[in-house]
Image (cartoon, coloured by chain):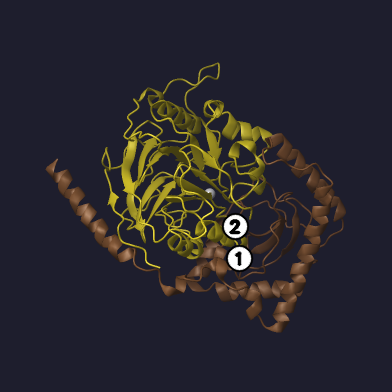
Amino acid sequence: MKHKMNRTTGFVMGALVVFGLTFSPVPTIAQQTAGQQPDPLESLPVKDREIVVAFQERVKDYTKMREAIELKMPKLAKESTPEQIQAHKTELEKRVREARAGAKRGELFTPGIAAFIRKTIKSEYKGRELVELREAVLEADTKGVPLRVNYTYPESKELVEMPPTLLLKLPQLPKQVRYRFVGRNMLLVDRENGLIVDYMLNALP
Amino acid sequence: MKRTATSILILAALVFGGLVGNALAQKPAPTQATGERVATAATAAPVNLTLPLKTDSVRFLAIGDTGTGTEQQKELADVMLRYRQAFPYEFVLMMGDNMYGGEKPADFKLKFENVYKQLLDDKVKFYATLGNHDESNQRFYKDFNMNGEEFYRFAKGNTAFYSLNSNYMDKRQLKWLEEELAKDASDWKIIFMHHPPYSSGGKHGSSSALREVVEPIFLKYGVNAVFAGHEHFYERVKPQKGIYYFISGAGGKLRPGDVKKGSPLTEKAFDTDMSFMLVEVAGDELHFQVISRTGQTVDSGVLTRQQPKAKPLNASHPSAAPAGQEQGNAAKP
Ligand SMILES: [Fe+2]
């Protein structure tokens, strides 16, 4: 018992010291949090900005089109059953796929934006960070994800975590569409119907 | 911007010093010809509650990475059920990876509804967060109570809970989190998400890019505790910059021996069997007890609430709702 008391007292004192150190004012650099940082678009050279804005417009065109389709469907309730979720997803997938029949790779990821994204990743990730990102992406269970526009991202496959620090640097997307790594490639995936809207090769160096 | 140094971690820890439990082989439990499960050591182990069961406390269970539908997940669910007799928790926080390997209606049944049927029948609410194996559409599933959002807030008693989508932490989500926290006057602010900002896991380890963007927000707005999964073990991390971090990710899978030995982050870890956490928030104290699949208590203790820097201005999330009463989900992303 005595031994336990001594350990506890020692621990509490240690904790006080640690907290005394760690509960110090947050460093000034953290005052502006990631959510408050200005849009990186503002600091881009004019040419890059034009490329990014044009890309965002193309993505917006896609979301407008699929929103119009979804509006014509029964709305998915916030308290749906798995059957309702499945039915909604399948129907939305079918209708959007039909509406985009003939869509080809590179219609959203044009060579200009693809080069910009490669450049951004390359400048953000160097040395050990790049090795870690590559490991995380290549280890993920994404084998079998088709690199095909208008195909579905299989729901049994892992969705690789997108590093938030990278997301803050990439052109912001509407909430319906996501960047996803599959191997070294980057996909644009619709979060509701799972369709691969577009993809680009070798995004990751 | 001063964060005062008054937090004290008082650990009553641990009852069964060292890591308890036998290595768990991921094999099916014995079954009878009827398919009914045979009683195991787990179902026979006595309930040994260390939580105080104070009046009006907020009581919940935290579990992660559940979505397998294996016999082991069910055995753990049996223990969860038995502990509810002694500790009537009202809701469950799910740390993500709610559905491994597909999410057809049959998967929801196999990996969730059948496993936790009794708890669902007893009206225990499950609040989910999305993991790297979960589709966004899970946010519409009625029994995950996500209100159609990938990230959301709810409150119980003096405690606010924030479920974040750590798989896609973009600017939209960060902005929402910051705005919500800024007006949150709750005594306790608890985050739950899939990826752990701090972890001693050998396979994954700390999600450092995530930490880089969320930790400054947690610190700025006085987040008290963070619960995560992704790693298939239990870990109580030493307080980091004053914030308490837990990993409870062995609800359906186990990665035996994955906690790095001698990790400077670890206060306590358990990686030899599956587990869940019971949590009771009572006033300025957060009590916890971690139970293994065999019914052993593998960690327990009490944390004291860190002193807030200041009450937020224009608080729109009141801090004093009766315990157990939910305050509605906050602004949409
Ligand atoms: Fe995970």
Give the image quarter of residue A64: bottom right
The residue identified by callout 1 is A167
The residue identified by callout 2 is B168
Q: Amino acid at mark 2?
A: Tyr
Q: Position of residue B88 (x, y in %)?
A: 43, 30
Q: Image quadrant for the C terminus of chain B?
A: bottom right
Q: Residue furthest left?
A: A2
Q: Position of residue B320 (x, y in %)?
A: 46, 45
Q: Position of residue A55 (x, y in %)?
A: 75, 70
Contact flag, marks 1 and 2 (Cβ < 8 Å):
yes
Apparent colour of chain A: brown
- From the viewer's perspective, is B189 left or right of B133? left
Alpha carbon of mark 1 to alpha carbon of mark 2: how far? 8 Å
Of helix, strand and loop, which one carries label 1? helix
Within-10-Å neighbours for mark 2: few <14, some 14–19, many 20+: many
| Residue depicted at 57% across the width and 71% down the height | A37
Residue toward you, B222 or B81 = B222
Q: Relative to B218, say whether B293 is above or below.
A: above
- Count of numbered marks: 2
- From the viewer's perspective, is B310 left or right of A59? left
Q: Relative to A76, say whether B196 is above or below.
A: below
Q: Is residue B274 visible?
A: no
Q: Which chain is yellow?
A: B
